[in-house]
Image (tube, helix red, strand yellow):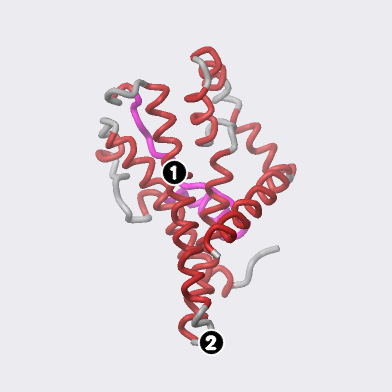
Amino acid sequence: MIPSLMDMLIWLPAILIALTFHEFAHALAADRLGDSTPYYQGRLTLNPLPHIDWIGFLMLVFFRFGWAKPVQVNPYNFKDTGVKKGMMLVSLAGPAMNILLAFIGMFSLKLLYAYALNENVVLAIRLIEPLVWINLILAVFNLIPVPPLDGSKILAGLLPDSGAQMIYSLERYGPIFLLLLIFSGAIGKILLPLVNLMYGLLYLLIF
């Protein structure tokens, strides 16, 4: 169902924050590991514009899942970690940032619910609730171990070299498989239970 204009306006800040911080986390992790590629490409910033892929952005606005412009890195510039471990750490940084933002959002909701009779507080709650959901959706979606999602590189970093090479060899087919998951509706059946589970765990942890 297409969301109303009011819904889109409420979700828009959350989407911009979630996408921007996700890609910034990738860029920052790569930079800290010794690769300056994201810096020179203007991705080491919290300005949303360099990170936005407009198709993925509109998908998030209208369908509650989407993507941003991938941060390009050169893993051969990584110091000390090596290619496989470095790519795992850079890939993990994005979903980890989204989970951190969801945690901060949920904690903020706990503080605000005590003053929910105030109109300004009600508005803040309406803006923060989507922040929690969008960040959890992005985290879970990107942790799916299908190339080119972050989860595939995280899995490759945990596997022996032979297993990692197998994951990397599937990258050319990954987008096709991912599109099949999306358009068949299977992605929703995977995402929603996991997102709801993570939301429930955050709620139990904080409330």
Relative vertical location of residue 110 with respect to residue 27 in this rendering, above or below: below
Q: Is residue 63 left or right of residue 54?
A: right
Q: Secondary structure at mark 2?
A: loop
Could you tell me residue 167's position as x and y percent? 55, 22
* Tag 2 and tag 1, C-beta contact below 8 Å: no
**Residue 113 versus residue 82 in the image, above or below:** below
The foreground one among 73 and 21 is 21
In the image, is residue 106 part of the stretch drawn in magenta?
no
Q: Is residue 94 left or right of residue 179?
A: left
* Range of residues picked out in magenta: 52-75
Q: Is residue 76 left or right of residue 111?
A: left
Question: Disc 2 versus disc 1: distance between alpha carbons?
Answer: 35 Å
Closer to us: 15 or 119 = 119
146 w.r.t. 63: above or below? above
Count the labels in the image.
2
Give coordinates of residue 71: x percent, y percent: 39, 39
Location of the N terminus by quadrant is: bottom right
Locate the C terminus and report the quarter of the image it occupies. Answer: bottom right
Which image quarter: residue 186? Answer: top right
The correct choice, above or below, for 89 with respect to 82 in the image is: below
Q: Residue at x 53, y 47 (%)?
A: 139
Tell me the kind of residue under disc 2: Leu
Kind of residue at disc 1? Gly
Q: Secondary structure at mark 1?
A: helix
Residue indicated by mark 2:
117
Could you say which disc has been placed on residue 94 in the image? Answer: 1
Residue 39: percent from left, percent from top: 26, 40
